[in-house]
Each structure stands twice: as C-alpha cells, then as structure tokens.
Image: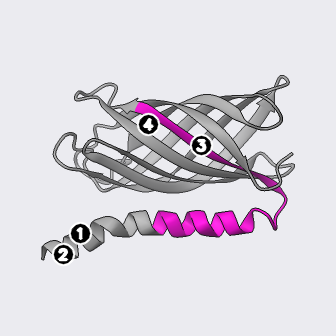
Amino acid sequence: MDGRKDRMNKAPWRAALVLAAIMGAAIPSKAGDAALLLGGGIGNLRHPPRQAYGSLELTYKMEDHPWGLWTAAEAGGTEKYVGLGLYLAWPFKERWTFAISSGPGWYSNRGTFNLGSELEFRSTAYLMYRWGRRSSVGISVSHYSNGGIARHNPGAESVRIFVGIPLGRGH
C-alpha cells in the first residue's frame, strides 16, 4: 500500500517534467520567448507556519503576443506544488515587464498547512527587470486557492525572488 501511495505522490512531478520537456523541445522550433525562472521564497504569509521554498518555473510567451504558458515545481519543508497554466506578459519602459499567470496544480503537504484540497489554483503577479541582453531578475506574489471546490479553503500567499534565464531564440 505504501508503495502505491509513493508512486501517486511522484505522478504530478513526472507530469510536470514531461510538460517541461515538451515545452523545451518546442521552443527552438517556434517563435517566441522562453525563460527558466529559478528562485526562492516564503510561503504561508497570512497563516503560520511560514515556510521557505525553492521554485523552478518555465515560461513560454508567443512572439508578438502577450500570452503564453507556464509550468512550475515548488517545494519547501513539508509542502510541494506542481502546476501549469496561462501566462500573460506586458513589457513597459525599456527593461521592465509586468506579467500575470494562473492555472491549476497539485498541492501536497505533510501536516503543516491544510489548503483543503490537492487541487489548488495558483494566481501570480510578476515584476521583472531585464539586464544585459535577455537575463532578468524579478519578484512575484502568488495566491493559492482551491476555488471553493472543497469545504475548507483558507487560501495562502507567497512571495518569491527569482532570476530569469533565457532559453531558445528569444529577442
């Protein structure tokens, strides 16, 4: 029984890696911008216990369009999140970009903070500054919620600092 549960816990991580590989393979053949956002943050801002976490996110934005896709894997302490969804980005000024993203994901914890469901939606706002040709640094704020599909829905917020590493062709 424990082996089956371990395989089920690994399934979302495998799905996210497969999605990232598919997106990564498509990047060189399609026009657009892709970036790997590597960072760390603090979660459970409103509801202790706060937890530090590491984050790996892949974004892909279509050239000449503000929209694209994202997939992310986040883990820290006893909490894990793997998700995917839509991504919208708007450059402003010379080197700044504001972006938002939202989509469903799988959330797991081992007893620290119950969000009410394993299905959790992550909505994120990003502010990024590009230095050099394409690399960037940024900050993001995320809200996690099960959207009321479970009886318990406290929601949670996190803040993250990241470095954006360009992939593929880019601009």
**Spatial separation of the CA atoms under disc 4 and disc 3:** 18 Å
Q: Residue at x 12, y 77 (%)?
A: 1
> Which color scheme does this rendered protein use?
one colour
In the structure shown, which secondary structural element does the residue marked by tag 2 occupy? helix
Q: Where in the figure is residue 94, as x and y percent of width and height?
A: 85, 24
Marks 1 and 2 close (CB-CB < 8 Å): yes
Say which of marks 4 and 1 sits in front.
1
Disc 3 residue type (three-letter)? Leu
The percent position of residue 130, horizontal first and vertical second, equals 75, 30
Distance, label 2 to label 3, CA atoms, is 33 Å
What range is drawn magenta here?
Answer: 15-41
Q: Secondary structure at mark 4?
A: strand
CA distance for labels 1 and 2: 5 Å
Disc on the earlier residue, 2 or 3? 2
Q: Amino acid at mark 2?
A: Gly
From mark 3 to mark 1, how far is it between C-alphas? 28 Å
Which SS class for mark 1?
helix
CB within 8 Å, label 2 to label 3: no
In this figure, which residue is indicated by the disc labeled 4? 143
The verdict on residue 29 being magenta is: yes
Task: Tell me what residue is drawn at x 28 percent, y 71 percent.
Answer: 8
Q: Which mark is residue 3?
A: 2
Measure the C-alpha gap from mark 4 to mark 2: 32 Å
Distance Cα–Cα, label 4 vs label 1: 27 Å
Residue found farthest to the left: 1
- Number of other residues with Cα within 10 Å of mark 1, as a class: few under 14, some 14 to 19, many 20 or more: few
Residue 6's disc number:
1
Name the kind of residue labelled 1 in the image. Asp
What residue is disc 3 on? 37
